[in-house]
Image (cartoon, helix red, strand yellow):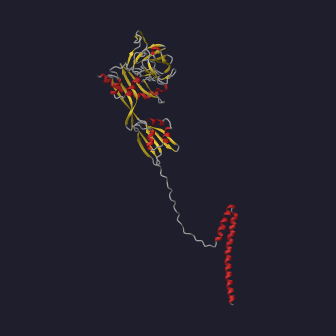
Amino acid sequence: MINHDFKSGQTKKTAATKNKLSTTHWMLLGGGILLAAVIMLLPTKEAEAIRAVNNDILPLQNLQLSIPPQIEPIAAEPSEQKAPPTFQARSVTVKRGDTLAAIFNREGFSPRELYDIMQLGALTAALKDIRPGESLEFRADDTKQLVGLSYKTDITHTLIIERDSTGFSAREEIRSPELRVAHASAIISNSLYRSGQQAGLTDNLIMELAGIFGWDIDFALDIRQGDHFTVLYEEQYLDGEKIGYGDIVAAQFTNRGKTFEAVRFTNEKGVSQYFTPEGRSMRKAFLRSPVDFRRISSRFTRERHHPVLGKKRPHRGVDYAAATGTPIKAAGDGKIIFRGTKGGYGTTVVIQHGTQYTTLYAHLSNFKRGQRNGSYVKQGDIIGFVGSSGLATGPHLHYEFRVNGTHRNPLTVKFPDAQPIKAAYKKEFSAQTQPILAQLNVLSRGIALAKNSL
């Protein structure tokens, strides 16, 4: 009985176990069939992937898995941003005896950097002319490498050199000054130069005034006490401070009772010239005096006692006494047709001006370099220097003026005018110059009244 009970109990236990396993197997079998069906419906690659995963997972089916507690995501630390480079600026004053190479070496910059900068062209050539007292501003990065250089070439121009990924580059920064119109008037009591200075004109403005009227007035011979002038001229301002002077805008000059007026006109191409109020050019085809002289030592005459030959003969030109080496200017535009030694004339230049006119310059000490027979020159170009070559007793310029081969007196011959203002510019000329001429006339009446009250 006892055995029977034992067996009966074991049998019941075994049957229960079989029933339990049977249920599990059926569940697995159903899941397998479902998985197989899904795999059959999937593309080949996805099916293979699932099979691989399934093979790894099935042996672990009977393991009890626990879900780990939720873990807060770890915040990524902010990436370390690179700080922008800092630049150190240093101003260096050029010392006596300094060279650019010495300054670069003293500031710790390499000869290669200097070489690269000097290869940039005409702009950086200005660095060769640095002078004591001037300043250079260097900029370097944290590694002491040169990244920039500034050099003020004058009050309005600054050379800027900068380094980028490709190397150095250069540019010029230009500040345009503000222009204001000022005026001056004077009655001449001794000379144009002294009267101009007393009126507040600079040497350059006085010379410009003489140049404007130089074709009509001989300032060495024609100026008389009581002559008077009025000038409108430009003053240049930067940041509210006067830094210099510009050009003459308009001027009036009364010489021996005859009044001349000139006004500057700038066309659309930026070319400026002086004209009469009617639009005739103040510039003549020829200069009255081609040299700055001390005095006229001999005038044009049909008969003169020659100081060297000791006999009478015509003097077909004008002798301007001047120091040896004084520059001689071409009286007008033309072509050099003779440049050499010419008998008693000594060292001589002859210029052809168009088809009618020739001018001769004799007794030179030397020629201007770079010119030769056939060279074209412009009015005012230097062609040689005063001397005493040939038959001359002292340094002077012998100047002749010929019209169609005939000698004419350079002091009295009527010169042809230069080209008047072009028809296309007449309307613009009138609009630009009328307000200026109106102001000039008001100021001129004031100086005329002052003269009459003396």
Q: Is residue 308 above or below residue 118?
A: above
Res. 445 in view: no
Q: Is residue 328 above or below residue 150?
A: above
Q: Is residue 167 above or below residue 66?
A: above
Q: Is residue 5 left or right of residue 167?
A: right
Residue 312 vs residue 73, the one in the foreground:
312
In the picture, the quarter occupied by the N terminus is bottom right
Q: Residue furthest left?
A: 454
Please tell me which residue is depicted at 68% across the width and 90% down the height of the picture. Answer: 2
Q: Is residue 409 left or right of residue 3?
A: left
In the picture, the quarter occupied by the C terminus is top left
Where residue 366 sits in the image (x, y, percent)? 45, 21
Where residue 85 sits in the image (x, y, percent)? 47, 49
Res. 162 in view: yes
Please tell me which residue is depicted at 67% across the width and 75% down the height of the picture. Answer: 24
Please tell me which residue is depicted at 43% across the width and 29% down the height of the picture. Answer: 432
Can you tell which quarter of the image residue 28 is in?
Answer: bottom right
Where residue 121 sits in the image (x, y, percent)? 50, 36
Where residue 199 sits in the image (x, y, percent)? 33, 27
Please tell me which residue is depicted at 69% across the width and 86% down the height of the picture. Answer: 8
